[in-house]
Amino acid sequence: MNLSDIFEDADKKNLVLPEFQREFKWSVDKQANLLASVSLAFPVGSILVLKGKTSDYAYRHLGIVDQGIDKENSSCTFLLDGQQRLTTLYFTFTDQFDSSGFTSVEEFDEYLSNIYRKLKKRWFLRLPDFSEEAINMPEDLFGYEDLELDEERLNNLEPDDIFGCFQSYSFNENNKQVTSWWSPYFQLRSKEPDATPYATAFRRGCVSNKLIPLFYSDNKRPGLWRPLIQALAHERAHQLLEANLSDIAGIRFALRDYDDDERLNSISSVEDAEENYQIILEMWRNKANVWAESVSTYIKDIASKYEVTAIETTDVTRAIPIFKHLNEGGIRLSDYDLLVARAAKKIDASEDNYSLGNKIKEVIGSSISLSQALLRHVPESSKPQLFWPLNFEIADDSIPNSAFQSLILSTLSLRSYVKYGGLVDDNNEFNINVGLTKSKKILSLKTESIRDNIESVVKGLCRSFAFINIRCGVRSLSDIHYRLMIIPIAYVFIDDMLWEDPTVHDKIEYWYWASLFSGNYIFNQNKKSIDDVVNLYRWCVKDITNPFKYRHDKVLKDEHFGDRDLLTLNRTGEWPGKAVHAAILQYTLSTLPRDFLFDANVRLLPWKISGTDSFDGNRDRLEVHDHHVFPLGQAASVGQSSSELRADKSHPLNSPLNRTLISAKANGRISSLPTEKYLPKLGDGLAEAIVDWHFLPSIRQYSGSKEIDFYKSLLDGRFDKLNVGIRKELANLVEGLD
């Protein structure tokens, strides 16, 4: 079957994706590489399709996020392998973003929001611009320089040669590019009175930028497609005429096939050429028309003549095993992809289609109601009311990112293989182990078990994100260095009663800081996480007394994670890692400190920084910077730059103890002011309190000294305040608890 047939089937909604298929993921470079291969008729592999009915599996249309609906149980073709390739080609060579049929921007917004983000672009083929001394010109694929298409030369090109010939322009419902001629939103705006007609502006833009729109090559806009390529050809013809009017021999050679009456033979001088200007121009235009027709045909033939080998099956019952078998080659399917496929398997013929992906999107796309137990340490005037998981950066286009997928798989496996809460046997031996989180066990989960437990697991994970954001100052999922620490929290918060229990929240916060600052998760993270699922849950339900006291005692004493010598850079050749740097920022932010503003008393709130507390789910994020308390420029010697100082890992000011989070506004105002100049001015008279909130030494200790020992003494002071602050908080969290 050729691409045109495939596109027609997709248009008619006959070619669909089973819901267990992976989401669209290809980057712009992968898409361009495919276009280069197909444009030169290079093979790009076969596809695998299944003939069936729309009732066989939940399904989606190519490039579309939401599940399709067909009440008539129509015949269809499921695409089992080849989605990334065919979706790319479909959205490149057909105009899926034609906005002419929409009556409003809001209506088009709704349509566009249901298309994968990486597809929201229009593809063009670039021609070289010979009108000026351009740099990085693309390959002259179609002989635009002389308006002579050489198909033999095309046959000798390879995809890498023409990769740079493909140009895409992106847009979306939040970045409409409404003033850009190539945007469908510009097309919508052109309907307004007095607006420039779309066809005119589009043609002008293409000619000016030397672009051929591939999405109009399906000839559904013949009044735009052919005249546009002709306009490009005529402009080049005019350039060639003007540049070569004095080259009589060159004119005769270039136009040899367009001088049937041999009129050029009578031209022997520049004067003759100027006198016969219109005759020569007409010949150039004839040549341009031939070139335009050849190029138009070549591009149209990409879809109509490119053959795709389709391997077809009609065995509906084996679709999912076949899909899983594809994991042996091609683009490797992740465990998450395979789990989605397993969940889609029909348990009995009469049941409705099931989509694990849609179930997860439903949970993470909704707000989480916050337990008052979670918020009881937050001042009443600052309390958030909602938490939107998507704003915690756990997904892309509502599709879980790889870090979140991994957490889903591990937590789901633990929840599915062992009855919730039944973590130890009668002999007090653990019923769960690291093996339950490995691929072999995850991919052996039963369809029923996946469906039964997925909602509670994802809800537990979303609650854990709310917890570490509000209680622990973690701004996003990528902000937590030891992500496996999420799993014990999520396991506990699967239980609604535990989510509402204040003592449970205090115990979990105690466990989090004690485990983090003791360096417990540096080694054997998988085993530590599984052990902590058991011990944290049992402590929360009061089966056992505090099993984490030994970690409390080791806070800021681990030489690998961060003890005094490591953090103050007193150990030669060893420097603190990213984990302790992140931990210090998180702990400081968890106390809801005041910002470094001169004229205001403003708290830094983690949920404002991550933008997770909006009422409508839209992210309204306070920008913060990871600030050097003592600016590097302050310590630089004469002739030494800040960048040179930054590269010196052994300098005290490069310690994490010299870092804290402040707002972008505050950072801009402070700029490169010395510490002794800006710190006393903070907070309109509250400077000492603000410094204390960030666990910094008293303002009285700062001076303009550039001595290394002076900076080390300040680091020692901050270490002491952090150490005391963390230990005091740990004691307060478990005061009166068993």
Image: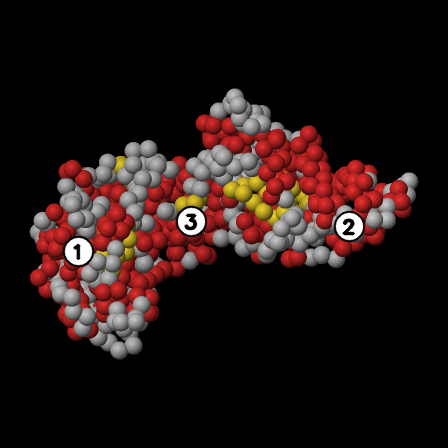
Secondary-structure class at tag 1: helix
Q: Residue furthest bottom?
A: 572
Amino acid marked by disc 1:
Tyr
Residue 61 position, x and y percent, is 56, 36
Say whether residue 729 is left or right of residue 85.
left
Residue with the mark numbered 2? 246
Secondary-structure class at tag 2: loop
Query: In the rendered view, would you say 413 is above or below 218?
Result: below
Residue with the mark numbered 1? 678
| Inter-mark Cα distance, 1 to 2 | 72 Å
Amino acid marked by disc 3:
Asn
**Quadrant position of the C terminus in the picture:** bottom left
Q: Residue furthest top?
A: 193
| Inter-mark Cα distance, 3 to 2 | 63 Å
Pick whichever, 142 or 285, lies toward us.
Answer: 285
Say whether residue 618 is left or right of residue 104.
left
Residue 683 position, x and y percent, is 14, 48
Amino acid marked by disc 2:
Ser
Q: Earlier along the polypeptide chain: callout 3 or callout 2?
A: 2
Say whether residue 665 is left or right of residue 135.
left
Residue 286 visible in image = no
